[in-house]
């Protein structure tokens, strides 16, 4: 839904986002943690738009494997299909339907690109505008 409501066609912007579940100590995963950030200039202007979310058949999708970051096990909430799929339905959405709309942050593009180049494993390279 995040991608659907951002007006990237008329207002170019960079995006930083993620969702992961963490397991610290035990292997039991905690609640999902979300992060959303767009170029600060786009955030200030609130370049939102109505969009469409496509519902896909789950059969061929695989969950991205867990990874370790120090002592923490991280489960990205990202699924991918190795083969093309055809949507089974589509859902029209409005910006106000996105439950994290008021939690989208703004970042300085140049600072993010510099930090990403200096430490590519340092996601999310956030740099407040």
Image: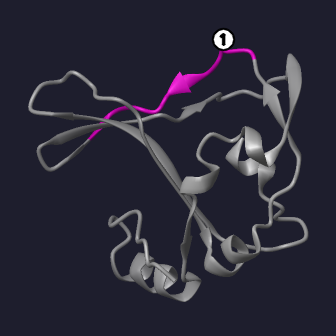
Rendered view: 52 above or below 107: above
Q: Position of residue 84 (x, y in %)?
A: 78, 28
- Say if 107 sits above or below 100 in the image: below
- Nearest to the observer: residue 104 or residue 1: 104
Residue 16 on image: x %, y %: 55, 62
Residue at horizontal 82 percent and vertical 30 percent from the top? 54
Please provide percent x and percent y for residue 62: 54, 23
Query: Magenta span has 39?
Result: no
Answer few, some or many: residues within 10 Å of disc 1's Cα (few below 14, many 20 plus, some between 14 and 19): few
Q: Which residues are magenta?
A: 57-67
| Secondary structure of residue under mark 1 | loop
Query: In the rendered image, which quarter contains the N terminus?
Result: top right
Q: Is residue 74 left or right of residue 24?
A: right
Examine the residues drawn in magenta and state their main secondary structure.
loop
Which residue, as the protein is rendered here, is positioned at the far top?
59
Q: Is residue 64 magenta?
A: yes
Q: Count the numbered circles shown.
A: 1
Q: Tell me if 79 is positioned left or right of 5 in this view.
A: left
Q: Which residue is mark 1?
A: 59
Rendered image coloring scheme: one colour
Camera-side residue of 80 and 11: 11
Q: Position of residue 39 (x, y in %)?
A: 63, 75
In percent of the image, x 48 and y 34: which residue is there? Answer: 77
Direction from residue 28 to residue 119 in the image, left or right:
right
Residue, x 33% and y 33% (percent of image)? 66
Instruction: Residue at 74% x, 38% y: name it.
Output: 97
């Amino acid at each position: 839904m995040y991608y659907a409501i951002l007006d990237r066609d008329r207002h170019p912007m960079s995006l930083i986002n993620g969702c992961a579940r963490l397991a610290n100590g035990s292997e039991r995963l905690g609640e999902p943690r979300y992060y959303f950030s767009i170029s600060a200039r786009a955030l200030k202007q609130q370049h939102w738009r109505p969009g469409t979310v496509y519902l896909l058949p789950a059969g061929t999708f695989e969950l991205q494997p867990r990874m370790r970051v120090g002592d923490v096990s991280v489960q990205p909430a990202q699924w991918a299909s190795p083969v093309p799929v055809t949507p089974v339905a589509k859902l029209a959405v409005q910006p106000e339907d996105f439950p994290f709309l008021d939690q989208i942050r703004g970042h300085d593009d140049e600072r993010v690109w510099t930090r990403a180049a200096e430490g590519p494993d340092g996601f999310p390279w956030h740099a407040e505008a």
